[in-house]
Amino acid sequence: MSEGKNQPEMKHALIERLMHYYQFVNDRLDTAGSTVTSGEIAELVQMDDTLVRKDLAALGVRGQPRVGFNVADVLAAIREVLGFDEALRAVLVGVGQLGGAIASYPGFARYGLDICGIFDSDPDKIGQLRGRQVILPMGRLPIVVRGRGVSTAILTVPSEATQEAADQVIRAGVKAIWNFGNMKLKAPEDVYVRHEHISTGLADLSYHLKQMKPDWHS
Amino acid sequence: MSEGKNQPEMKHALIERLMHYYQFVNDRLDTAGSTVTSGEIAELVQMDDTLVRKDLAALGVRGQPRVGFNVADVLAAIREVLGFDEALRAVLVGVGQLGGAIASYPGFARYGLDICGIFDSDPDKIGQLRGRQVILPMGRLPIVVRGRGVSTAILTVPSEATQEAADQVIRAGVKAIWNFGNMKLKAPEDVYVRHEHISTGLADLSYHLKQMKPDWHS
DNA sequence: TAGATTGTTAATCGATTAACAATC
DNA sequence: TAGATTGTTAATCGATTAACAATC
């Protein structure tokens, strides 16, 4: 309370739930005016219906007793709170296979992602095409970031190069970083860093597989 | 309690914390016999030291008052419980850019991942090389899965093809699926499915960026 | 020894769930 | 109207943190 935060500060778990609702409820957007009950969402998402109602109430979506929630309302409220309707302009640094995959994946556009430039430090790659984008040299970062009002950098560089790349994009002026490497990186307080821990997924699989065959020893 | 589970059933949050500890403590493995205190881990990972001690105690790692925990012990315990020392044999289905990136990323080997075959349904791709692997036709799935004792399938296919691919790998006999598509998929109870929700990361970024400039409207 | 750190029990906190009155 | 479903308050549950005695 003594901290200077004025926003309600949503927890990551809530954002995850909202995304989950969003994806399921999207499938229900068939006819205009279609509705969905908290029980139905809860069923699909495997959780208690009270929590669904509480989450939706927190977003300001009102339902109708005996009817449920208007599908379009639910979607609009989630889009609004998560900011999908505002462009999220980004640069991508490190055009390896993963970077190329992200740069050319069309599915992110529905969440507002707009990749304004792709960069690499390898002189051999500069000028090459990836999808409809030309790979640019790192030196052009500041111009693109400032010129296009880019807020975010997607980092898909080798682990050793992560901090160096982060420093460059921060200097260029981005305010958020989406890091796919597995090095933790240092950034000033006012830069939001989201680290995508893909290897945690692997650890999760590994653990569950081990649980499934508890009688073995190698 | 009335359910048939006999294992303690670790929560996902715990697995995540253990991975986090693992990555940090790894950096401390310089000299044999090096130690680390719960306070140091807590500092690095930004959490309470009591929780670190509780987690390590749950794994059976014992520390020494005034000294801390043996780094090698901590690492070994985490490796053991998460199953990193047992090979996790997998096939990868869908050799697009993302699939290629995963197949050729060497970093997963330290968690035991062993990709035994990469598959695609596109006849043009079959026979091509990705890293040191040849792309195989889907028809060969059962042979590879059974022949090599493959437990896991990594699915990096387009969304529309996800369920079809899942059905095929399940029929071939895998017991776990690591799904990178954003379609939820149906699988029998005895197949563990881990869905890697990358777009949730994007939603998280989008939300936090919106928080950072609460005074704008587009 | 004195003091830092562990290991563990008890207290707190927050998140989830249950209960139920309000409503259409 | 009767009944399903919302919205919300109260109860429960579990996870985190605080406290502190044990220990090297």
Image: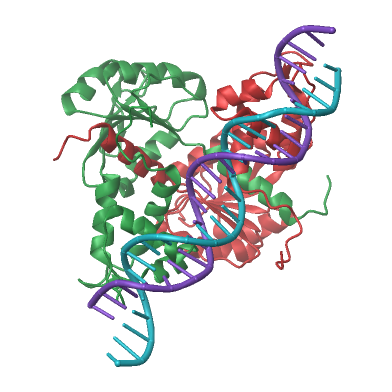
Chain colours: A green, B red, C purple, D cyan
Q: Closest to the observer: D23 or A96? A: D23
Q: Closest to the observer: B145 or A72? A: A72
Image-based side of A9 in relation to B44, left or right: left
Q: Closest to the observer: B110 or A62? A: A62
Q: Closest to the observer: A184 or B211? A: B211
Image-based side of A185 in relation to B211, left or right: right
**In the rendered image of this protein, does residue B10 appear above or below residue A62?**
above
Picture quadrant where residue A116 is located: top left
Q: Position of residue B141 (x, y in %)?
A: 61, 58
Picture quadrant where residue B109 is located: top right
Q: Is residue B117 visible?
A: no
Q: Position of residue A9 (x, y in %)?
A: 36, 39
Q: How many marks?
A: 0
Q: Position of residue C9 (x, y in %)?
A: 75, 40
Image-based side of B137 in relation to B213, left or right: right
Image-based side of B7 in relation to A202, left or right: right
**In the rendered image of this protein, does residue B15 appear above or below residue C18?**
above
Q: Residue at x 44, y 35 (%)?
A: A97
Q: Position of residue A218 (x, y in %)?
A: 83, 44
Residue furthest left in the image:
B218
Q: Residue at x 71, y 64 (%)?
A: B1
Q: Is residue B14 visible?
A: yes
Q: Residue at x 30, y 15 (%)?
A: A171
Q: Residue at x 34, y 16 (%)?
A: A168
Picture quadrant where residue B57 is located: top right
Q: Quadrant of the N terminus of chain A?
A: top left
